[in-house]
Amino acid sequence: MLVAAWAVGIEKIWIYLRDEYHACRETLEKELAALRADPPGPLPQIELRRGAGAYICGEESAMIESIEGKRGMPRLRPPYVAQVGLFGRPTLEHNFETLFWVREILEKGAGWFAGHGRNGRKGLRSFSVSGRVRKPGVHLAPAGITVKELIAEYAGGMLEGHEFYAYLPGGASGGILPASMGDIPLDFDTLQPHGCFIGSAAVMILSDKDRAADAARNLMHFFAHESCGQCTPCRVGTAKAALLMEAPKWDGPLLTELSRTMGDASICGLGQAAPNPVLCVLKHFPHEV
Protein backbone atom coordinates (compact mmCIF):
# COMPACT_ATOMS: atom_id res chain seq x y z
CA MET A 1 0.00 0.00 0.00
CA LEU A 2 2.83 2.38 0.84
CA VAL A 3 4.45 1.76 -2.55
CA ALA A 4 1.15 2.45 -4.33
CA ALA A 5 0.60 5.57 -2.23
CA TRP A 6 4.09 6.84 -2.97
CA ALA A 7 3.75 6.16 -6.70
CA VAL A 8 0.67 8.33 -7.16
CA GLY A 9 1.08 10.84 -4.33
CA ILE A 10 -1.65 9.66 -1.98
CA GLU A 11 -2.32 11.51 1.29
CA LYS A 12 -4.52 9.00 3.08
CA ILE A 13 -5.06 5.24 2.92
CA TRP A 14 -8.29 3.47 3.86
CA ILE A 15 -8.36 -0.30 4.44
CA TYR A 16 -11.83 -1.82 4.16
CA LEU A 17 -12.13 -5.11 5.99
CA ARG A 18 -15.20 -7.29 6.41
CA ASP A 19 -16.01 -7.50 10.10
CA GLU A 20 -16.23 -11.30 9.97
CA TYR A 21 -12.43 -11.47 9.74
CA HIS A 22 -11.59 -10.96 13.41
CA ALA A 23 -8.16 -12.60 13.25
CA CYS A 24 -7.19 -10.56 10.18
CA ARG A 25 -8.25 -7.34 11.90
CA GLU A 26 -6.22 -8.21 15.01
CA THR A 27 -3.14 -8.85 12.87
CA LEU A 28 -3.63 -5.68 10.84
CA GLU A 29 -4.10 -3.50 13.92
CA LYS A 30 -0.90 -4.91 15.43
CA GLU A 31 1.12 -4.39 12.24
CA LEU A 32 -0.24 -0.88 11.64
CA ALA A 33 0.76 0.10 15.18
CA ALA A 34 4.27 -1.25 14.54
CA LEU A 35 4.43 0.65 11.25
CA ARG A 36 3.41 3.94 12.87
CA ALA A 37 5.98 3.39 15.63
CA ASP A 38 8.82 2.90 13.13
CA PRO A 39 7.83 4.29 9.73
CA PRO A 40 10.16 3.73 6.74
CA GLY A 41 9.68 7.37 5.73
CA PRO A 42 6.89 9.90 5.40
CA LEU A 43 3.76 7.93 6.26
CA PRO A 44 0.30 8.65 4.84
CA GLN A 45 -2.54 8.59 7.33
CA ILE A 46 -3.94 5.03 7.45
CA GLU A 47 -7.46 4.19 8.61
CA LEU A 48 -8.80 0.66 9.04
CA ARG A 49 -12.52 0.70 8.30
CA ARG A 50 -14.63 -2.23 9.49
CA GLY A 51 -17.38 -3.06 6.99
CA ALA A 52 -20.69 -4.78 7.55
CA GLY A 53 -19.70 -7.47 5.10
CA ALA A 54 -22.29 -7.06 2.36
CA TYR A 55 -21.39 -8.97 -0.80
CA ILE A 56 -22.18 -5.89 -2.90
CA CYS A 57 -19.37 -3.97 -1.18
CA GLY A 58 -16.91 -5.98 -3.24
CA GLU A 59 -17.88 -3.57 -6.04
CA GLU A 60 -15.47 -0.64 -5.83
CA SER A 61 -17.94 2.24 -5.74
CA ALA A 62 -20.29 0.43 -3.32
CA MET A 63 -17.29 -0.05 -1.03
CA ILE A 64 -16.60 3.69 -1.19
CA GLU A 65 -20.22 4.44 -0.33
CA SER A 66 -19.92 2.13 2.69
CA ILE A 67 -16.68 3.77 3.86
CA GLU A 68 -18.44 7.14 3.64
CA GLY A 69 -21.08 5.81 6.04
CA LYS A 70 -23.81 5.29 3.48
CA ARG A 71 -25.65 2.19 2.35
CA GLY A 72 -23.38 0.10 0.11
CA MET A 73 -24.81 0.73 -3.38
CA PRO A 74 -22.86 0.99 -6.66
CA ARG A 75 -22.52 4.39 -8.28
CA LEU A 76 -23.36 5.14 -11.87
CA ARG A 77 -20.30 5.78 -14.03
CA PRO A 78 -18.87 8.13 -15.22
CA PRO A 79 -17.34 9.69 -13.23
CA TYR A 80 -14.99 6.85 -12.35
CA VAL A 81 -13.46 6.48 -8.89
CA ALA A 82 -10.04 7.51 -10.25
CA GLN A 83 -11.64 10.92 -10.96
CA VAL A 84 -14.26 11.24 -8.20
CA GLY A 85 -13.92 8.59 -5.54
CA LEU A 86 -13.81 8.54 -1.75
CA PHE A 87 -15.26 11.79 -0.33
CA GLY A 88 -15.14 13.24 -3.84
CA ARG A 89 -11.37 12.83 -4.17
CA PRO A 90 -9.47 10.93 -6.91
CA THR A 91 -9.07 7.40 -5.53
CA LEU A 92 -6.78 4.48 -6.34
CA GLU A 93 -8.59 1.28 -5.38
CA HIS A 94 -6.99 -2.17 -5.40
CA ASN A 95 -7.78 -5.50 -3.81
CA PHE A 96 -5.30 -6.98 -1.38
CA GLU A 97 -4.06 -9.73 -3.66
CA THR A 98 -2.92 -7.15 -6.21
CA LEU A 99 -1.06 -5.16 -3.56
CA PHE A 100 0.34 -8.34 -2.02
CA TRP A 101 2.57 -9.01 -5.04
CA VAL A 102 3.98 -5.47 -5.41
CA ARG A 103 6.80 -5.91 -2.91
CA GLU A 104 7.96 -9.31 -4.19
CA ILE A 105 7.87 -8.20 -7.82
CA LEU A 106 9.91 -5.09 -6.96
CA GLU A 107 12.42 -7.15 -4.95
CA LYS A 108 12.70 -10.18 -7.24
CA GLY A 109 11.87 -8.65 -10.60
CA ALA A 110 9.07 -9.05 -13.11
CA GLY A 111 10.91 -11.99 -14.67
CA TRP A 112 10.62 -13.96 -11.44
CA PHE A 113 6.85 -13.50 -11.28
CA ALA A 114 6.38 -14.15 -15.00
CA GLY A 115 8.51 -17.30 -14.64
CA HIS A 116 5.58 -18.99 -12.91
CA GLY A 117 2.54 -20.18 -14.80
CA ARG A 118 1.21 -22.93 -17.03
CA ASN A 119 -0.45 -23.28 -20.41
CA GLY A 120 0.97 -20.01 -21.67
CA ARG A 121 -0.16 -17.97 -18.64
CA LYS A 122 2.15 -16.02 -16.33
CA GLY A 123 2.25 -15.41 -12.59
CA LEU A 124 0.85 -16.92 -9.40
CA ARG A 125 -2.69 -16.92 -8.06
CA SER A 126 -4.28 -17.69 -4.69
CA PHE A 127 -6.95 -20.29 -5.41
CA SER A 128 -9.55 -20.74 -2.68
CA VAL A 129 -10.59 -24.36 -3.20
CA SER A 130 -13.71 -25.73 -1.49
CA GLY A 131 -16.13 -28.59 -1.99
CA ARG A 132 -15.56 -32.32 -2.38
CA VAL A 133 -11.77 -32.33 -2.05
CA ARG A 134 -9.46 -33.77 0.60
CA LYS A 135 -7.56 -30.51 1.27
CA PRO A 136 -9.84 -27.49 0.93
CA GLY A 137 -8.27 -24.10 1.57
CA VAL A 138 -6.25 -21.36 -0.11
CA HIS A 139 -3.57 -22.80 -2.40
CA LEU A 140 -0.90 -20.71 -4.10
CA ALA A 141 -0.60 -22.17 -7.59
CA PRO A 142 0.57 -21.12 -11.07
CA ALA A 143 -1.75 -19.01 -13.17
CA GLY A 144 -3.22 -21.08 -15.98
CA ILE A 145 -3.36 -24.31 -13.97
CA THR A 146 -6.40 -26.44 -14.85
CA VAL A 147 -8.96 -27.49 -12.27
CA LYS A 148 -7.98 -31.15 -12.69
CA GLU A 149 -4.36 -30.26 -11.93
CA LEU A 150 -5.43 -28.09 -9.01
CA ILE A 151 -7.44 -30.94 -7.49
CA ALA A 152 -4.72 -33.55 -8.01
CA GLU A 153 -1.62 -31.54 -7.08
CA TYR A 154 -2.83 -29.06 -4.47
CA ALA A 155 -6.21 -30.14 -3.04
CA GLY A 156 -5.25 -33.74 -2.29
CA GLY A 157 -7.63 -35.29 -4.82
CA MET A 158 -11.36 -35.91 -4.48
CA LEU A 159 -12.89 -37.15 -1.26
CA GLU A 160 -13.16 -40.92 -0.99
CA GLY A 161 -16.28 -42.17 -2.72
CA HIS A 162 -16.71 -38.99 -4.76
CA GLU A 163 -16.07 -38.53 -8.47
CA PHE A 164 -15.38 -35.15 -10.04
CA TYR A 165 -18.63 -33.95 -11.65
CA ALA A 166 -18.59 -30.16 -12.02
CA TYR A 167 -16.86 -27.01 -10.80
CA LEU A 168 -17.41 -23.32 -10.24
CA PRO A 169 -14.19 -21.66 -11.48
CA GLY A 170 -14.79 -18.17 -10.10
CA GLY A 171 -16.97 -18.09 -7.03
CA ALA A 172 -20.69 -17.51 -6.88
CA SER A 173 -21.07 -15.61 -10.14
CA GLY A 174 -18.31 -17.26 -12.19
CA GLY A 175 -20.54 -19.94 -13.73
CA ILE A 176 -20.57 -23.75 -13.55
CA LEU A 177 -18.74 -26.13 -15.89
CA PRO A 178 -18.81 -29.94 -16.18
CA ALA A 179 -15.82 -32.11 -15.33
CA SER A 180 -15.41 -32.85 -19.04
CA MET A 181 -14.28 -29.21 -19.38
CA GLY A 182 -11.75 -29.49 -16.58
CA ASP A 183 -8.72 -28.93 -18.81
CA ILE A 184 -9.36 -25.21 -19.42
CA PRO A 185 -6.56 -23.02 -18.01
CA LEU A 186 -7.83 -21.01 -15.04
CA ASP A 187 -7.01 -17.40 -15.80
CA PHE A 188 -8.55 -14.03 -16.60
CA ASP A 189 -9.40 -14.42 -20.28
CA THR A 190 -9.64 -18.18 -20.76
CA LEU A 191 -13.12 -18.87 -19.37
CA GLN A 192 -15.19 -16.09 -20.99
CA PRO A 193 -15.79 -18.05 -24.22
CA HIS A 194 -17.59 -20.63 -22.05
CA GLY A 195 -19.77 -18.09 -20.23
CA CYS A 196 -17.61 -18.13 -17.09
CA PHE A 197 -14.83 -16.11 -15.47
CA ILE A 198 -12.10 -16.60 -12.86
CA GLY A 199 -13.07 -13.67 -10.62
CA SER A 200 -11.45 -14.06 -7.21
CA ALA A 201 -10.38 -17.64 -8.03
CA ALA A 202 -12.77 -19.19 -5.52
CA VAL A 203 -12.97 -22.67 -7.05
CA MET A 204 -15.80 -24.90 -5.83
CA ILE A 205 -15.71 -28.62 -6.62
CA LEU A 206 -18.89 -30.68 -7.05
CA SER A 207 -19.00 -34.48 -7.15
CA ASP A 208 -21.33 -37.08 -8.61
CA LYS A 209 -23.33 -36.79 -5.37
CA ASP A 210 -24.18 -33.14 -6.17
CA ARG A 211 -26.38 -31.47 -8.79
CA ALA A 212 -25.32 -28.37 -10.68
CA ALA A 213 -28.96 -27.22 -10.68
CA ASP A 214 -29.04 -27.30 -6.88
CA ALA A 215 -25.88 -25.19 -6.75
CA ALA A 216 -27.33 -22.68 -9.23
CA ARG A 217 -30.57 -22.49 -7.26
CA ASN A 218 -28.68 -21.86 -4.04
CA LEU A 219 -26.59 -19.16 -5.72
CA MET A 220 -29.62 -17.36 -7.12
CA HIS A 221 -31.20 -17.21 -3.66
CA PHE A 222 -27.91 -15.75 -2.45
CA PHE A 223 -27.92 -13.09 -5.19
CA ALA A 224 -31.53 -12.18 -4.45
CA HIS A 225 -30.60 -11.75 -0.79
CA GLU A 226 -27.43 -9.76 -1.49
CA SER A 227 -28.83 -7.47 -4.21
CA CYS A 228 -28.62 -3.88 -3.00
CA GLY A 229 -32.03 -3.25 -4.58
CA GLN A 230 -31.00 -0.12 -6.45
CA CYS A 231 -31.84 -1.29 -9.97
CA THR A 232 -34.99 -3.15 -11.02
CA PRO A 233 -33.37 -5.75 -13.35
CA CYS A 234 -31.28 -7.12 -10.48
CA ARG A 235 -33.71 -6.60 -7.59
CA VAL A 236 -36.69 -8.13 -9.36
CA GLY A 237 -34.75 -10.37 -11.75
CA THR A 238 -32.88 -12.36 -9.11
CA ALA A 239 -36.06 -12.94 -7.08
CA LYS A 240 -38.03 -13.96 -10.18
CA ALA A 241 -35.24 -16.27 -11.38
CA ALA A 242 -35.03 -17.94 -7.95
CA LEU A 243 -38.78 -18.56 -8.08
CA LEU A 244 -38.66 -20.00 -11.62
CA MET A 245 -35.77 -22.28 -10.63
CA GLU A 246 -37.87 -23.93 -7.92
CA ALA A 247 -39.89 -25.68 -10.63
CA PRO A 248 -38.97 -29.37 -11.21
CA LYS A 249 -38.63 -28.55 -14.91
CA TRP A 250 -37.10 -25.18 -15.77
CA ASP A 251 -38.66 -22.85 -18.33
CA GLY A 252 -35.50 -22.47 -20.40
CA PRO A 253 -36.68 -19.76 -22.84
CA LEU A 254 -38.11 -17.58 -20.06
CA LEU A 255 -35.02 -17.96 -17.84
CA THR A 256 -32.80 -17.17 -20.83
CA GLU A 257 -34.78 -14.03 -21.65
CA LEU A 258 -34.73 -12.91 -18.01
CA SER A 259 -30.98 -13.59 -17.81
CA ARG A 260 -30.29 -11.46 -20.88
CA THR A 261 -32.30 -8.58 -19.44
CA MET A 262 -30.41 -8.76 -16.15
CA GLY A 263 -27.08 -8.93 -17.94
CA ASP A 264 -27.83 -6.00 -20.23
CA ALA A 265 -29.62 -3.63 -17.86
CA SER A 266 -28.19 -4.12 -14.35
CA ILE A 267 -26.04 -1.31 -13.01
CA CYS A 268 -23.19 -3.40 -11.63
CA GLY A 269 -21.54 -6.77 -11.86
CA LEU A 270 -23.82 -8.50 -9.34
CA GLY A 271 -26.91 -8.32 -11.53
CA GLN A 272 -24.90 -8.68 -14.74
CA ALA A 273 -23.22 -11.91 -13.61
CA ALA A 274 -25.99 -13.42 -11.45
CA PRO A 275 -27.48 -15.31 -14.45
CA ASN A 276 -24.19 -17.08 -15.26
CA PRO A 277 -24.89 -20.22 -13.16
CA VAL A 278 -28.41 -20.48 -14.65
CA LEU A 279 -27.21 -20.20 -18.24
CA CYS A 280 -24.40 -22.69 -17.57
CA VAL A 281 -26.84 -25.27 -16.19
CA LEU A 282 -29.15 -24.82 -19.19
CA LYS A 283 -26.18 -25.23 -21.53
CA HIS A 284 -24.04 -27.90 -19.86
CA PHE A 285 -26.46 -29.77 -17.57
CA PRO A 286 -29.80 -29.82 -19.43
CA HIS A 287 -30.43 -33.40 -18.24
CA GLU A 288 -30.83 -32.06 -14.69
CA VAL A 289 -33.59 -29.53 -15.48
Image: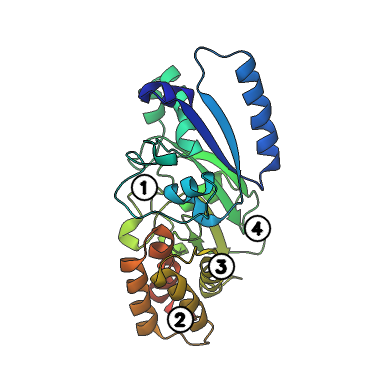
Q: Is tag 1's residue or tag 2's residue first in the polypeptide sequence?
A: 1
CA distance for labels 2 and 4: 25 Å
- Residue at point 39%, 36% (across, down): 89
Location of mark 2 (residue) = 287
Disc marking residue 188? 1
CA distance for labels 4 and 1: 28 Å
Would residue 42 be visible to someone looking at this image?
Answer: yes
The crowd level at tag 2 (other Cα within 10 Å; few <14, some 14-19, many 20+) is: few
Location of mark 3 (residue) = 225
Residue type at tag 1: Phe
CA distance for labels 1 and 3: 27 Å
Residue type at tag 2: His
Location of mark 4 (residue) = 159
Disc 3 element: helix
- Viewer-side label of 1, 2: 1
Q: Is tag 2's residue or tag 4's residue first in the polypeptide sequence?
A: 4
How many marks are shown on the rendered structure? 4
- Residue at point 39%, 49% (across, down): 185
CA distance for labels 1 and 2: 29 Å
Q: Position of residue 213 (x, y in %)?
A: 51, 75
Left or right placement of residue 36 versus residue 270 in this view: right
Disc 4 element: loop
Q: Do labels 4 and 1 touch, CB within 8 Å?
A: no
Q: Up-down: is 147 above or below 42?
A: below
The crowd level at tag 1 (other Cα within 10 Å; few <14, some 14-19, many 20+) is: some
